[in-house]
Image (cartoon, helix red, strand yellow):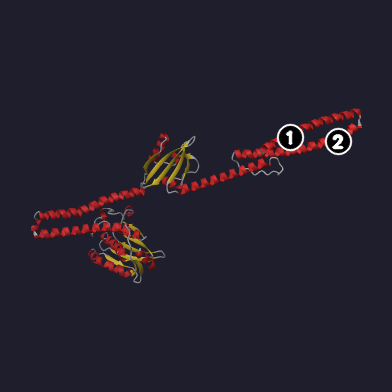
Amino acid sequence: MNSLRGMTILSKISKQILATVGLSIVTLAMNFYAFSGMKRDWFFLSLVAMTILTIVTIVLGIYYYQHEKTIKQLQTMTENIVHDQPAAPLFVAPDNPFKGLADQLNELQSRQQDEAKSIRNSNTELITILSSLPVGIMVIDSAHDVIFANHKMSTMLERNILTQVHPYTQDIRNYQLLSLIDGVFNDRKSQQAEVRSIGDQPITWDTSVVYNQLENDFHILVIMYDISDIINVKQMQIDFLRNASHELKTPVTAISGFAKTLLDGAMDDQKTLVEFLKIIDEQSGQLTSLINDVLTISHIQNGTNYDYQSMNLHDFVNSELAPYQSVAKVHQISINNQVGSGVEVNTDASMLTRILRNLVSNAIKYNIPNGQIDITYTVNDSYWQLHVSDTGIGIAQKDISRLFERFYRADDSRTKQKVSGTGLGLAIVKELVDSIGGTIHVKSQRGVGSTFTIEFPIVTENDGKAASDN
């Protein structure tokens, strides 16, 4: 309605201009007649008409100029709105016939700016979310160019992915991943596969390459998730079953073999009977220890209630080292308790016993004649530490990361044990330390020795009672 009103007023202005032109012609005729006939009355009348005509012309000119200026401003504003360009609001006088149209355009421009701001905010939030996801994401357009990639994708591909549009082959070097993406481009169908990296520490990614059809185009979304830990857990489960079967088979075969030999007549020889029964008893003990260790790990993983009590750590270490002194003396190994006599800690005695005994047992197994084992203590504001150091054969750096796996044997040199074991000692230590929220670290050098450091969270008496109640 307002625009129609503006057009009507323009039409009126045009008619007024035409009338003014007509009046000008009449005035010129009157002037010509007055001058030619020397008519004073006509001359005066023509001057009045010229004055009126001049005033009307000036008024119409100003009026027309103002409206023309407003129309140009409206045209500029309309073009900016059409091309999604920012434009300043247009303010006109209340009596201006284009006031309604200007207000509508201002409202349209304001809404457009609000919607554009909302879209920008949504895009920013989406990019922020995608950038913080723990999965790698890359968007590739139909021209084979990367238009977006989050930080996780850069980490996975070990490349600094540019924000500018560029070919995806510039970032991806993995042949299996390239083949997967090329297959989606060729077949126009989504695909999924496990992609494995090549390197010193291979990584497995669960990779989905999704084909997205747009209205007149398409793009491809690459989603990669690191499943190396899952693969490793599966492999550890397989290795555990295989190793457990092997460890169980040895004592069971020995017990069965010697029992059958005795039943076949060897029992009649008293010396052989005693020797074979000792072997059966030894293997039975080994089998029992193995089963108990497996059950211990299962029990820890299912949850354990600890009884935290205050104790003198120096006296406790002395009591736990006593059973090992005779074995250590046979191998000329000295065990030194260097924990201060006044050290008090709040912990579970049975849990600490298992940890200390396993570590000391290993320190004896892999030590050297005339070697040494030191038990030390440190503390800070957050945790207290127990260190078990030996001067043994040490551990290769490549084996330290797998040292706490069940039944894992580092190499041939570490399997020459001086004290028998089940191969689950360090795995039990790791499970116990994890169950109380602690950590365990290993520093070792081949031919020099190893140091195992366990960090125990500092637990107050109230915390200990709460843990015992739970």
Q: Quadrant of the C terminus?
A: bottom left
Q: Nearer the viewer, residue 411 or 303?
A: 303
Residue 428 percent coordinates (x, y): 30, 58
Q: What number is the disc on residue 204?
A: none
Residue extending furthest toward the front: 1
- Between discs 1 and 2, the one toward the N terminus: 1
| In contact (CB < 8 Å): disc 1 and disc 2 | no
Residue type, mark 1 in image: Lys
Residue at image mark 2: 48
1 or 2: mark nearer the eye: 1
Callout 1 secondary element = helix
Q: Residue at x 64, y 40 (%)?
A: 77
Secondary structure under badge 2? helix
Look at mark 1 in the image and give the residue it sits on. 12
Please tell me whether residue 135 is drawn above or below residue 455 in the rendered image. Answer: above
Q: Quadrant of residue 56?
A: top right
Residue 190 percent location from the top left of the image: 41, 38
| Image spot of residue 462 (x, y percent) | 39, 67
Quarter assignment of residue 98: top right
Above or below, comparing residue 398 to residue 170 in the picture: below
Report whether 440 appears left or right of 105: left
Q: How many marks?
A: 2
Quadrant of the frame with the N terminus: top right
Give the crowd class for mark 2: few <14, some 14-19, many >=20 residues within 10 Å: few
Q: Amino acid at mark 2?
A: Val
Q: How many neighbours does mark 1 have within 10 angstroms: few (below 14), some (14-19), or many (20 or more)?
A: few
Asked if residue 417 can be seen in this view, the reply is no
**Front residue of this view, candidates 90 and 342:** 90
